[in-house]
Structures are given as structure tokens and as C-alpha cells.
Image (spheres, rainbow, N blue to C red):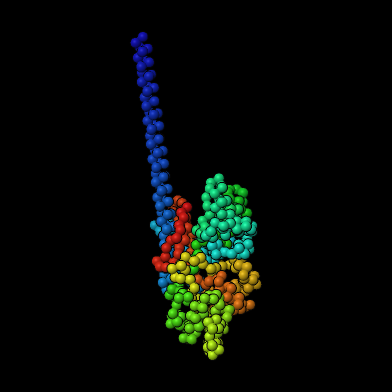
Amino acid sequence: MNATLLRGRRGFATLMVFLVIIFGAMVVSMVQSASYAQAAAGREALARVRAHWAARAGIEAAIARLEAVREDDDDSDAYRTLNEMTQVADGELAGASWSVRTTDDGREVAGPSDAASKININLATADQLRSVEPFMADDVIDAIQDWRDGDDDALPQGAESGYYGGLQYPAGPRNGSFRTLAELELVAGVDADDVRGEDWNLNGLLDPNEDDGDESFPPDNADGRLDRGWSGIFSTMSVEDSKGRSGEPKLDITAAEEGEIQQRFKVSADQAKAIRDYMQSGQSGGIPDFIRNNLSDLARLTVQRRGGTRQEIQQAGRTQNLSREQLGALIDEGTTIPAEVLQFVPSRLNVNTANVKTLEYLPEIEPEVADSIIAERSSKPQGFASVAELLDVPGMTRQSLSIVAQLLCTRSNVYVVTCKGVDERTGLEVEMIATLDASSLPAVIREIRVR
């Protein structure tokens, strides 16, 4: 009996020893697994930090080049800013690297994109909206205009607060400028597919999931080219340049003195007086009037309107007309918008960076003229330095230039930098999309997204 009991106790003790060993092994295994997981998480976190700061370094490199060019105030080369920023599109930083890329005509290229190479949707007219692809229905066009205008009166097929307030999740139109392209999707009747096309994350690049057919979202045609939908046509970030080619703030000719006009536009005293008097006549159409009309005719008209004598009218008619250089200075250095407002005005389309398709979306410019503009631009290695140089384009008259000058500019100050930072050891990526505004110096980051 005692022997049997002893053997039972020994067997129980042996079993307990085995259980303790197994339990200990499990504990050790769990501790090791947790340690490995923590180590892996630590390595991933460190890799993400390296990739993050590499991406940020690429953004800062772009800012530095942008500011350097703007400080130089040399506008003889319209492509210099983009070229300089492209030179720092690739770089390395402490175990990581960065690359800045964008899409041009469906293909990926090195460097940032010019926000003014697209039509600013806050300036787009109904006719311009109607001309784009994918096609915009009239109800969408009216709704877009209602969204951005300052009143609560709906256009015939538009939508105002009454419509948006009745939705499942009530909201309201901004009744102000669009701040982002994604905001366009909040407008009545707008389909996100039309806004984004294949570029579902709006980063301006063809990502793997955007070029794999039906394998993953979003839908795409897997043709190796990025279809950006309306996001490839429109911008919300571009703003008018508040400085002229001289680097000085543009001169408001509605409030300038004759001496200021004479000095800035290199005109005679008589010409400066004619410009000043016409702008103060109360019936001026602004700078386009000086493009489409001779200055002598405008001077004579001004005197007639104020009831001048026959002799005064004849004297005004002898005012020397603006030379092409003087007209170019007036276009490039002058404005009719106060300086404190100009820095918030949406930009015209940059004729040097817009593609021919975008130019054709401006119905005010005939397709053959758009083609001629592109052809003339191709013959200029440094691009158009002044809107006045568009007079070199075949078929361009002073009358047509007066229209085109209200739609096109030759320089930009807002750029979108899409920068990917990559950790060299793990391949982990962090993407930053920054909108840089050099309207004034130092340049500022108006928007930044991190993915």
C-alpha cells in the first residue's frame, strides 16, 4: 500500500515537473514572441520616422530652391523655377531617400507641378465648365456657381442652402471660393469619379492600385497612363502674382500718380497723363482697353467725355501711342486690383505650363489659336516672358490679345510638391503632398497631406 502510494506520488511529481517545464517553455516562447513583435514594431516605427523626414527634407529642398529663384527676380526664363526645383527632386537623408514626381500628359515625370497650369475653378465661367471632359451637365454647372457665389439665390438648375439643408446629413454651400478639389464632391450632382478619375487619392501620381484593372479599387483601365478626371483640369490653389517682372509690387493704375505711371511703364509725361485721365474717367474697361485701342484714341475719348474744347480734343489725339515694350510693361507691371486684394485673387492660366488640351478648354481661345500658341511656345526655349509676346503668335491681333490677357499669365508662384520618402532598409514609404506659395517671401506651405 505504501509502495503504491509512493509510486503514485512520484508519478504525480514527475507530471508536475513536465507541466512546469512545458509552462516555462510557453512563457519563454510568449516572451520571445512579444520581444520580437516589439522589436519589429520598433524597427517599423524607426523606418517610418526615417521615411517621414526624408519626405519632409524633399519638401524643404523644394522650398529653398523656390525662394532662391523668387529672390533673384530674373524672369528671362519662364521655366527656371520648375527646372531649379526639379534639380532637387531626388535626394538622400540618413538611411532614406526622397523623390518628387508629378504627372504630365498622363506620364510620370520628375519635379513638382505648377498650380497655374490648370484652370482655377474659382474663376471658371459657365462656358469654360461646359467645355471640359468628362462632360459637365448644366445642373452641375449651375450648382458649382451657386456653391461659390456669395448669395443664396439658386440658378435655374442650381442648388443653394434649401437643397443642402434637406439632405440626410444637412449642410450648406460655402458661398465662397472652393478651397480644395475634394470640396467639389460636396456640390449637388457631382460624382466623385468625375472629379478624381483614376487618381482616387488625388496625389497626381499613378499608384499600383490605380493601374491594375479590376483587381482592386478604384476602377481603372490599366493602360499605364493616369486619367485624373477634373482634378487634372482644375485647381483651387493658384493665386495671381502680386509682383511684376521687375520684382516690384504691381502698380494699381486706378490710384497711381502720373509720375509713378511714367516711371514704372517707361512712358512719357503725356502718355502717363493720358493713362491716368482715362482710368479716372469712370468708364474705363481696365488694361484690356489699352491693348485693343490706341492710346491717342483713348486720350481723345477722355477729353470728349469731360466736354473738352475742340483744341483740347485735337491735342489729346496727338498723344503718342504705346510701343510694344510699353504695352508689355503695362500688362506685366500694372493692375486695377488693390494690392491687399490681389494676393487672394485666383490666378489666370499659365501659358508656359498649360498643355494644349487645357488651353482648348477656354472657349474664348479658338482651337487653331491654341495650337499656334503651343507651336510658338515650343520655338522659345525660355518660354513667353510677357503676355505681350503672344502678339508673335500667328493670327493673334490686339483685339484677341485683349481677351487672352484676361485668361493667361506667364509666371506662377504656387507649386504642388508630391514627395515620397523611402526607408532604405525596409522599403517603407511615406508620401507628403505640399502646396507651396511664394506670393511673398518667405514661401509658405498652404496645405500639406501625409500618407
In the rendered image, is residue 447 in sight? yes
Residue 147, relative to residue 293: is it above or below? Answer: above
Residue 244 screen position, x and y as percent: 46, 74
Q: Quadrant of residue 257?
A: bottom left
Q: Residue at x 63, y 54 (%)?
A: 221
Q: Residue at x 37, y 27 (%)?
A: 20
Residue 225, relative to residue 270: is it above or below? Answer: above
List the single residue furthest toward the bottom: 311
Q: Quadrant of residue 187?
A: bottom right
Q: Residue at x 37, y 12 (%)?
A: 4
**How many numbered marks are there?**
0
Nearer to us in this view, 95 or 302: 302
Residue 338 screen position, x and y as percent: 46, 71
Residue 391 screen position, x and y as percent: 58, 78
Nearer to us in this view, 167 or 368: 167
Q: Quadrant of residue 98?
A: bottom left
| The N terminus: image quadrant | top left
In the rendered image, is residue 371 in sight? no
Residue 34 screen position, x and y as percent: 40, 39
